Amino acid sequence: MFITPAFAQASGASPLGSTDMLIQFAPFVVIFGIMYFLILRPQQKRAKEQRELVQGARRGDIVVTTGGLIGRVTKSTDENEVELEIAPNVRVRLARSGIADVRSKGEPVKDAPAKDASKTQPPKKDASNS
């Protein structure tokens, strides 16, 4: 008995009501789109690059752990573990997820510029001092 008047009122609604609802949701859709392209997508890309970097670590590579230890990979025991040499004759097993950065064998440290021996010249001997 009460349902019939409710259906009658709903069927008489104007078609502009659905358009108003779409206009109200449009800012949320735009904000979600902006968040996806500015935050989520680059974060997923960085995570994928990090996974590939860690999985590509092989014997001889110098790695930095999440704890800050720097060591050379001596053995890759399986796909989830590596063995690091952090000091002469000091080896530790480490989960690959504990690797923060992989530095190649000949890659210099970015903070300290390497000095080139060919550019530095020995001091000249002064004849007056000798």
Image (tube, rainbow, N blue to C red):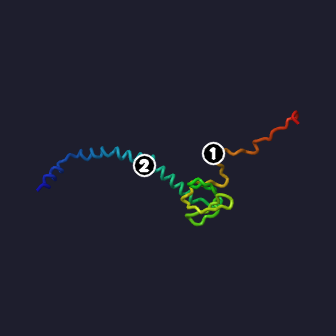
Categorize mark 1 by other alpha carbons within 10 Å: few (<14), some (14-19), many (20+): few
Q: Nearer the viewer, residue 126 or 21?
A: 126
Q: Seen from this angle, which residue lies furthest left?
A: 1
Where does residue 72 sit, x and y in percent of width and height? Answer: 64, 58
Side of 120 relative to 30 (left or right):
right
> Which residue is drawn at the image coordinates 88% and 35% (left, top)?
127
Q: Which residue is mark 2?
A: 36
Q: Seen from this angle, which residue lies furthest top?
A: 128
The answer to which quarter of the image holds residue 81 is bottom right
Q: Nearer the viewer, residue 20 or 111?
A: 111
Where does residue 65 sit, x and y in percent of width and height? Answer: 58, 55
Categorize mark 2 by other alpha carbons within 10 Å: few (<14), some (14-19), many (20+): few
Q: In the image, what residue type sits under mark 2?
A: Tyr
Where does residue 29 sit, x and y in percent of width and height? Answer: 36, 47
Q: Which residue is mark 1?
A: 111
Q: Secondary structure under badge 1? A: loop
Q: Nearer the viewer, residue 23 or 81?
A: 81
Q: Nearer the viewer, mark 2 or mark 1?
A: 1
Side of 91 relative to 123 (left or right):
left
Where does residue 130 sit, x and y in percent of width and height? Answer: 88, 36
Q: In the image, what residue type sits under mark 1?
A: Asp
What is the C-alpha distance between the residues marked 2 and 1? 33 Å
> Which residue is drawn at the image coordinates 34% and 44% (left, top)?
27
> Which residue is drawn at the image coordinates 46% and 50% (left, top)?
41
Checking the image for residue 88, the label placed there is none
